[in-house]
Amino acid sequence: MKESISNHKIYLGAGPAALPAMVLQEASKAIIEFQNSGLSILEIPHRGSLVQSILDESNILVRELCNLTDEYEVLWLPGGGRMQFCMIPMNFLGDDETAGYVDSGHWAHDAMKYGSHFGNALSICSSKNVDYCTLPIFPTSIPNHLAYLHLTTNNTIYGTQWHTLPTHNTTLIADMSSDIFGLPRKFSNFDIFYAVAQKNLGAAGVTLVVVKREMLEKTKRILPPMLCYAAHAKKQSVLNTPPVYAIYISLLMLRWIKHKSLSVLHEENLKKAALLYNEIDRNNLFYPLVTNESDRSLMNVCFRTKDDKTAIEFSDFCTHNNIAGIKGHRSVGGFRASLYNATTLENVKTLVAVMQEFERIYS
Ligand SMILES: *Cc1c(COP(=O)(O)O)cnc(C)c1O
């Protein structure tokens, strides 16, 4: 397996995001034939032993990387992040109950809005009034009657991240879509955590959901099985035809993460982010979106140029230098470099060199 694929751009998109070359190569082989089965991975039956072995190994690796016992259920569910925004309140927020939401960004806010379809969704703290350019200040005490507290560990669009999580005394649910396995966390602090695969864990089409078994007995409504965590758990992620290929790519990512180790990846991620933030702070043509250093995301680095003309020029300059996916989210504008696990330190060094060259030519 090669460490890189020729002609492959440096891809810094926020999601779908870059995957390691080794994962892409291994995944492409499986399309032609999976494990000497004489079949493509796209053809193997979803209730057969090959798919079972993909699920079994994935679940073991998730438990291992998160340091969890089997009091947690590992599920692979379709529908993406937004489906979790629906399923959480559907399952765990009664009509007359209140759930707390930490309103720290676009996705966090969306999750709260989805919650309000099923019960009361209460903003516990918010940084909306400053366009989410900082993390909100977590209150010293929170209401004690909450059905659960929902937070988003990394705000993909605005580039803020909880490096240490607020303390809590309630059922804690986290959307970890854009930073799962980018840094070590105490996963056993959470009752449920979930992550769409297309950011730091593979391809679009599947969401990893880890749920404490005792939660499965607390479902608040009678739901059709596809919307019910307990039903998915009972069928071990094969209630319906699962997105086998997407799950397999997550398995390849999990093996890759385990091989590198979470602590090594975290160290690399710290280095990558420091390198880029330093350049944004230093370079006269750019300024950061998140000025509060302790709130800055290791995963999504957002910055702007002094004016629109420079933005267009920098955008073209990146394209010319084979760097793609660096445009900011449409709601924020500017630029966003996503430095997920698959982005190498070399990639970031190249980006920084391009920014320096841009400054030399254009200022
Ligand atoms: C991308 C993202 C989502 C949305 O995922 P979809 O699969 O597109 O619904 C949710 N939460 C966070 C934190 C994200 O980064």
Image (cartoon, rainbow, N blue to C red):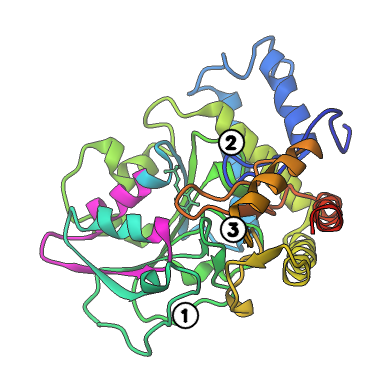
Disc assigned to residue 166: 1
Q: Quadrant of residue 101?
A: bottom left
Asked whether mark 1 and ligand 1 are closer than 8 Å, the reply comes as: no
- From the top left corner, tell me how far across and down residue 19 is, in percent: 70, 39
Q: Name which residue lies at 23% across and 51% down.
A: 90
Q: Earlier in the sequence, mark 1 or mark 3?
A: 1
In this rendering, is residue 350 above or below 127? above
Disc assigned to residue 179: 3
Q: Give the amino acid type for the residue marked by disc 2 in the picture.
A: Ala
- From the top left corner, tell me how far across and down residue 79 is, in percent: 39, 37
Q: Tell me the magenta residue range.
A: 83-108
Q: Residues within 10 Å of mark 2 (few under 14, many from 20)?
A: many
Q: Earlier in the sequence, mark 3 or mark 2?
A: 3
Q: Secondary structure at mark 3?
A: loop
Q: Secondary structure at mark 2?
A: loop
Q: Name which residue lies at 71% across and 48% down.
A: 314
Distance from label 3 to label 2 (Cα)? 15 Å
Q: Secondary structure at mark 1?
A: loop
Q: Which residue was labeled with disc 2?
A: 203
Quadrant where the N terminus is found in the figure: top right
In this rendering, is residue 32 above or below 86? above
Asked whether mark 3 and ligand 1 are closer than 8 Å, the reply comes as: no
